[in-house]
Amino acid sequence: MATVTLKGIKKIYPLSDDDKKKGKKGLFKKHEEEIEHEEKVNLQITDQGTVAVQEFNLDIADKEFIVLVGPSGCGKSTTLRMIAGLETISEGELYIDGQLVNNKPPKDRDIAMVFQNYALYPHMSVYDNLAFALKIRKTPKDIIDKKVRDAAEILGITEYLHRKPKALSGGQRQRVAIGRAIVREPQVFLMDEPLSNLDAKLRNQMRAEIIKLRQRIDTTFIYVTHDQTEAMTLGDRIVIMKDGFIQQIGTPYEVFHHPANLFVAGFIGTPQMNFFKTELAEENGQYYVPLFGVKFPMDAAHMEQIKEKGIKPQEITMGIRPEDVSICYEGGVEATVDVCEMMGSSLHIHTTIEDKEIVVIAQSKELPEDKQLGFAHGDKIRLHFDGHVLHLFGLDEKNLF
Amino acid sequence: MQLGKRPVWQTTLIYIGLILVCLFFLMPLLWILRTSLITKAEAYQIPPNFNVALTLENYIEVISDNGFGRYYLNSAIVALISTVLSVVLGAMSSYWLSRQPGNMTGAKLAILATQMIPPIVLVIPINTMIRSVGLNDTWMALVLAYLTFNLPYVIWMLLGFYDNVSKELDEASAIDGCSSLQTFFKVIFPLIAPGMMATAVYSFLVSWNEFVFALVLSGNATRTIPVAIAALETQNGVKIAELCASTILAILPIVLLSSFIKKYLVNGLTFGSIK
């Protein structure tokens, strides 16, 4: 139980000698090549090296569950590893429970970490894996035994205590890894993509267990994931990162309903938000968004903010979540159905309007009876975009509101 | 014919072939064993006489007259110390090297390069150095000389084993509260012990059998077995029977050693594939 404060934390990986020889120009070239077949990573390269994490400022409250989320290479794991003490901090200050810990080794930070690949000690039994940290700290044997058995009980691994990690399934190993952290009763609980090696069903199950676990051991959690569902369901607050920069910090509700910029809007929510390049136009004091020849007027709440902030008509990117698109029978724009996915209670309808793809989620029971099982390829439907569900982003990709 | 079962004649042929190959390699050894167990007069007989009485007189002579006990001790001490030193130092250096960020290509290449130099090239310079510090005719001289090729070998071999041990284990143990030394001894060492064992056996073998350095650097007091065996080739001709007896004596501990630790050896050599 502790607060964690990150002040202007920066991570710069120095250029290797090879890179220096090639010069920065060569490095950029290498970068471009990488981009072609790898995921796009736009880390800033300076004279000092590659900047993996930029000016990271975050106050984590006691017992808060913080999730760092972002695409691979965004610096989320690096940030976590700096908190853990596994990476040096290039710039900035890190406080755990009010103490500056920049130069403290991991063992003196009173943290526990769950690794992506579990990192269980293969030569030790589950019991010894759980007990290891306590043994190193010279805890009395009877206390170790009690703590290990308690943790095993919580995680339902009591019957495997004598086994070696090799003889366990992925899910069981994950439990042991979590158990190893629990017995420590650390001030801060760090988790680095702990569920990404599990299959989908197990992942959902473990996710629910982490929520339960959190209610039980009630400490500060910092959790790294690339999976936005995990981020939304687990986090009290979510930190969304990209290219080493924090994009937005907010509650799951905030980041979903009020994304700070285009990236966050596209990253959070599946299927992805639909985006359209258009403009914010004005007619007799009423603002509207023209799209496919139809004017979609802004609602009263938006209008109020427009007046308050003095937003001028301008070029924008408009975003609308698939579940916010409504199907109507008059007005709106006509769309052609390409593919319709039956998801059970809802339908994911992939449609096109003038070569532009739009995904719509419709609750099947709200559709007419003959359409509840889905639309056929080529069917025409009419779509309406309500003013109050529109997200408007300026040319700088920031949310206008 | 049942699926997967060879006819008898095929199996027989395969076994005959295998036995022939084995004999090809075993023949010299068997011949040495035979020669060591017959009288000197018989040993020189050409064509050889196969119907001879066996005797241990060569062994007795080698051990009692030629001071083989002393050479044994020299070999054992030198091989043991150089093996222990190279494994202990090598294990740590190699661990450090494998845990560095980046590939450390330069350092690794340098280590490999030491194995590319024919040892004989090093004999004269090392001899000069040893003499200049007054270590000639000591065990230490041989130990140091053997370290020059054993240590890089151990580092190189163990690198592969360390690379197989996930770095996350180091990190996990650091977070669990281990110092670097505790991490090494409590977590990493048990995992690469089989590899270390295999490497140790090999460097022991090399040190035990080493001849060129021993010839130059050892004196009467520190003569090792290979040098002692070579000394049996005298001005009056090769003392073939004694030579064979001492060869068998030289091989014996190695054979015993390897059968004793066969388990570790196999584990070490298949490390990684069973992970």
Image (spheres, rainbow, N blue to C red):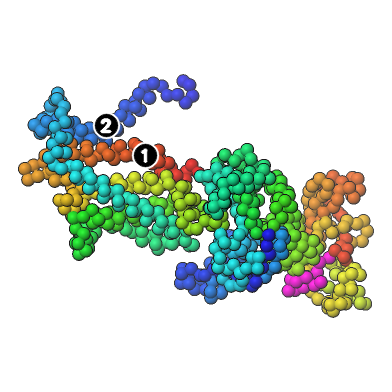
Type of the residue with mark 1: Ile
Q: Position of residue A182 (x, y in %)?
A: 64, 51
Q: Is residue B63 left or right of residue A151?
A: left
Q: Secondary structure at mark 2?
A: helix
What residue is shown at x 89% (from left), y 45% (from top)?
Answer: A370
Q: Which residue is mark 1?
A: B261
- How far is disc 1 from disc 2 in space, using C-alphas? 25 Å
Counting from the top left corner in percent of width and height, residue A247 is at 70, 68
Under mark 2, the amino acid is: Leu
Q: Is residue B176 above or below residue B271?
A: below
| Magenta stretch encompasses residue A392 | yes
Magenta stretch bounds = A390-401
State the residue at coordinates (56%, 46%): A141
- Residues A63 and B258: in front is A63
Residue at numbered disc 2: B23
Residue B20 in view (yes/no): yes
